[in-house]
Structures are given as structure tokens and as C-alpha cells.
């Protein structure tokens, strides 16, 4: 299991220090929620911020685009230093082309599904996926409650990936905390995104340990990306 703390819940005035604190605590991934105020009702950060902080961090940059027409900005995020770029199935009418371009630019490719989006949206692009992101809240804001129906969705996606002999990881974002983390892993998740349930409970090394213990991982969580 990989924990990818969402910077949406971090201190925006201290992003460089926050990234360093995550590294020092033993984290290896960090989740960037990029919002444009149109696809979701909120605005966060874009390529210039990520590019500036890429120089200050060795973390695996897990970049989640909650934006309209993501295909217009793929090169910008590649140049900014994204390691993994996740686009929403609902926002890209030419999903196959978008995923191929992400990979051509040297990034890992992922698809995100909103709570109401069926898993069949993945059927024709499975061979292009390094990761599937299951939104377990409606995207746009942090601190929301976990949608329980997401568990059955994760199981269906896990079955679909196994049937296709895919090595893609399943990531879950929204309302993830140490209490529901074990259940998410049992359903088939491999990467957990946690925002307020992580950043609101410093010190970060101790919070990482709490997640690890809840999942029965006494020695801590993985120290290297699985992609």
C-alpha cells in the first residue's frame, strides 16, 4: 500500500516546507489536485507551481487533473515534472488519444472516475493505464465523507484489471482515513490519497505510522513507487 497525501489539505503558504516534511517523514508520493473552477467548483494550482516545487522535491508527483479539456495542457504538466498524470474520463472526449499522448511525453497515465461514472468507461483503454483513480467523494473540495458504494466499484475494477492481466494500480481519493484504509486495501486498492485525515494530524511520521499500523504493516508503508 502506498500513501499519497493530498496537498489540497496542506498549508499553501508553505508548500516547499510541506514537501520536505513529507520526505523527512518517510513518504514517497504526494498528490496534486489541480482544479480549474469549471470541471469542479474550486481553483487550486497549475504547472508553474508544480514546476517550481519539482526542483525542491524528490517525491513521486501524482498529479490529478480536475480540469476541462486536459489534453490542452499535457505538455505543460510534463515540462513541470509530473511523474503520473491522471485525467477524468468525464472531461476528455478522446480518452484513448489523451492517454497515448501522456505516455508519449514520458509520464505514467491514469484515469479518474467520478462516483456516478460506471466502470465500463475503462474497458477500451485498460491497456494504456498505469493507474485507475476511484473518486470516493464528489471532486472539488477536501474534508468530505467517504461514499460507501465506492467499495463495490473498487472490487469491480480490480476484477476487470485482473481479467485483462493489467498491472495498473487502483488509487482511492476522498474521505480516506486509518479507519477505512484496511477495507479499501481488501477491496483491491493499492494507493490511498488522504488529505485532511493526514495533514490535520501532525507529526507526519506518526500519522504515516498510524496508517501503516491500521493496515497491519508494522514496518511502515513502501518507500518506493510501485509504478
Image (cartoon, grey):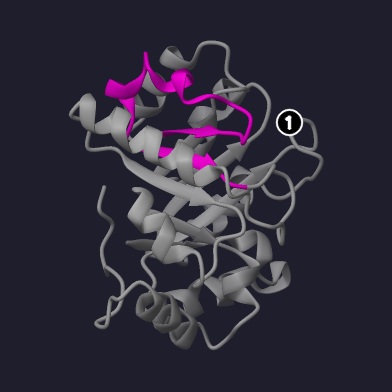
Residue 35 visible here: yes
Would you place residue 77 above or below residue 2 in this image? Answer: above
Determine the residue positioned at 44% across, 85% down. Answer: 205
* Image location (x, y in percent) of residue 185: 36, 57
* Image location (x, y in percent) of residue 104: 33, 24
* Image location (x, y in percent) of residue 155: 38, 40
Specify the quadrant of the image occupied by residue 198: bottom right
Determine the residue positioned at 42% across, 60% down. Answer: 183
Range of the magenta residues?
A: 110-136
Viewer-closest of 48 and 194? 194
Name the side, left or right, on which 226 lies relative to 35: left
The residue carrying mark 1 is: 39
Determine the residue positioned at 38% across, 33% down. Answer: 157
Q: On the rendered image, what quadrant is the N terminus found in?
A: bottom left
Would you place residue 138 above or below residue 12 in this image? Answer: above
* Image location (x, y in percent) of residue 175: 61, 59
Viewer-closest of 55 and 163? 163
Would you place residue 88 above or below residue 63 in this image? Answer: above
Q: Secondary structure at mark 1?
A: loop
Specify the quadrant of the image occupied by residue 129: top left
Asked if the magenta segment contains residue 43, the reply would be no
Amino acid at each position: 500500500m502506498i500513501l499519497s497525501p493530498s496537498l489540497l489539505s496542506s498549508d499553501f503558504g508553505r508548500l516547499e516546507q510541506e514537501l520536505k516534511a513529507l520526505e523527512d517523514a518517510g513518504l514517497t508520493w504526494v498528490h496534486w489536485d489541480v482544479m480549474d473552477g469549471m470541471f469542479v467548483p474550486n481553483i487550486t494550482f497549475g504547472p508553474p507551481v508544480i514546476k517550481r516545487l519539482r526542483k525542491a522535491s524528490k517525491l513521486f508527483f501524482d498529479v490529478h487533473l480536475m480540469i476541462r479539456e486536459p489534453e490542452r495542457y499535457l505538455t505543460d504538466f510534463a515540462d513541470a515534472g509530473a511523474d503520473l498524470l491522471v485525467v477524468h474520463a468525464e472531461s476528455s472526449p478522446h480518452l484513448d488519444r489523451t492517454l497515448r499522448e501522456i505516455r508519449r511525453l514520458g509520464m505514467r497515465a491514469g484515469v479518474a472516475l467520478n462516483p456516478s461514472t460506471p466502470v465500463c468507461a475503462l474497458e477500451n483503454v485498460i491497456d494504456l493505464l498505469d493507474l485507475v483513480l476511484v473518486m470516493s467523494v464528489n471532486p472539488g473540495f477536501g474534508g468530505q465523507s467517504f461514499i460507501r458504494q465506492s467499495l463495490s466499484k473498487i472490487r469491480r475494477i480490480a476484477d476487470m484489471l485482473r481479467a485483462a492481466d493489467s498491472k495498473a494500480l487502483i488509487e482511492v481519493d476522498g474521505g480516506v482515513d486509518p479507519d477505512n484504509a484496511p477495507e479499501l486495501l481488501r477491496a483491491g486498492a493499492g494507493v490511498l490519497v488522504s488529505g485532511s485525515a493526514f495533514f490535520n494530524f501532525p507529526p507526519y511520521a506518526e500519522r504515516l505510522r498510524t496508517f501503516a499500523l491500521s493496515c497491519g504493516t508494522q514496518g511502515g508503508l513502501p518507500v518506493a513507487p510501485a509504478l
